[in-house]
Amino acid sequence: MSLGVLVIGIICFVIAYATYGAWLAKKWGIDPSRTTPAHYLNDGLDYVPAKAPVLLGHHFSSIAGAAPIVGPITASMWGWAPVALWIILGSIFIGGVQDFGSLFASTRHDARSIGYVIKSNIGESGKKLFAIFAWLTLILIVAAFANIVADTFVASPESATASVLFILLAIVFGFSVNKGGLSLPIASVIGVILLFICIWIGTLFPLVISHFTWMIILLIYIFVASITPVWILLQPRDYLNSFMLYVMIIGAFLGLIFYRPDFELPAVTTFNVDGELLFPILFVTVACGAISGFHSLVGSGTTSKQLNNEKDAKLVGYGSMLLEGVLALIALITAAYLTSDMLDEFMAEGPIYVFSHGIGTFISQLGVDFTIAQTFGALAISAFALTSLDTATRLSRFIFQEYFAGNTPVPEAEKSNNLLTNRYIATIISVIVAGTLAFYGWEAIWPIFGSANQLLASLAFLALATWMVKLGKSKSMFIYPMIFMALVTLTALAFMIYTNFPHNPLLVIISVILFTLAIVLFKNAYQILRGES
């Protein structure tokens, strides 16, 4: 049964990529002959064209993180069937459309953020509201992921050593390909071999450092990573890391062919699990496995600035989301093939343990030692969490600079005397605020992240739909997902307010602010969507 669900999902994704993805590209007017911002704004820092496989690796690594793994495993408490159905349909008709559309819209707006798309089609106030909301959400992500990565490195010092070596390897790879003239195929083969040697060295020399020290190191690292030219670290590191995920997915798939476990969890449990309702909480919990607002920030942030050709947008934007759907289905299977008692026991160690144990079990069917396979799964997750951390930092810097740059593209605004558009100042402010939150209190407001993240998705659809109206093109592929995600988000926020009042006033206040923000933006866009303005 589990293999059948995975195969059905993959077949659906392949068909969707060839049909629905192609239809979207035709409807929007993807133009391969049009010069992208990565070329006409090339600054050697953020705007740097990348070949399609490299950009696919960056985008996929950045959006993968830990969420498409943790979300489906946690959501399996409602049964595997609704989760699998949401992953497949959500990835095809909602998440993939958002990611593809955000990347394309940003490319047609000088690779600026979704906030700028809102400004161009709704107004200045809409842009400011979105920018503040997006920046604060990214700050929360940086604070949370800094702690998650530090915890992972403390718990698994082998992954810490490997991650440090990955960074050094990526720098050498970046210089060899971009400055040394080494061809990408040859560099890729050498790089992937060295990547797995790094993992092996990590198991021999685990890096044992305290949580506090790792936090300081990580905050310094994300500052440097945010201001370093993308071709030195971000592009090559994410590209090489993506091979880890490809190997893990292929290994798990082949292992499932030999193992063929049945689902032990019920297909459907109940609508209400200890007060957590299937609607809307399942659609918030699965998050990146089907749709995530964070993806729209990546697509309109780092990825659009590196898009070499508009024709690559379908592979990078839509293809990455469908690939992430495959990862989410595998994550679901690692939970659903366990009995309820075993899953409860494993969940005491956390969803990451459930996933790495399942990956170890599946890959071990190919003759690989279980411990090595399980360690590899944990290493892959830690590598992607670190990737999401420094990408989120860079995105927060972009949004901060763009907010104060006005109508001027950021590369040109940096040449002015406005310090707030300076990348060093923007990064320092972002890292200090995130670092303070990381040490003091991020856990108190983390429960709001799921709703805030999906609210970003709803607002991204709003921006894309109004843009289509301005262009005189069909907006239907954005309107229905927008309405659904708005219902999910606003209902989840209403529950958050109800369940936390009056004992947690901070969460209540933030929820009310987000709820109000969404209503204001939808009200401002209503006439435009009706074609009246």
Image (spheres, grey):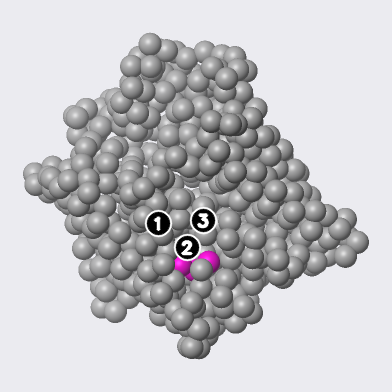
Residue 54, given in percent of the width and then of the height, sits at 41, 62
How far apart, in angstroms, are the residues tagged by discs 2 and 1?
10 Å
Is the residue under label 3 in contact with that under label 2 (CB below 8 Å)?
no
Q: Is residue 527 above or below residue 369?
A: below
How far is the residue under mark 1 from the one under mark 3?
9 Å
In contact (CB < 8 Å): disc 2 and disc 1: yes
Q: Amino acid at mark 2?
A: Ser
Counting residues from the start of the chain, the first of labels 1 and 3 encountered is 3
Dividing the picture into quarters, in which one does residue 91 lie?
Answer: top right
In primary-sequence order, the first of circles 2 and 3 is 3
- Please say whether residue 124 is one of the residues in the magenta stretch: no
Category of crowding for the residue at label 3, using alpha-carbon neighbours closer than 10 angstroms: few (below 14), some (14–19), many (at least 20) = some
Q: Quadrant of the C terminus?
A: bottom right
Q: Residue at x 34, y 72 (%)?
A: 228
Marks 2/3: CA–CA distance: 8 Å
Can see residue 183?
no
The residue that mark 2 highlights is 396
Residue type (three-letter) at the residue carrying disc 3: Leu
Look at mark 1 in the image and give the residue it sits on. Answer: 434
Query: Residue at point 64% right, 48% down?
Result: 513
Residue 382 in sight in this render: yes
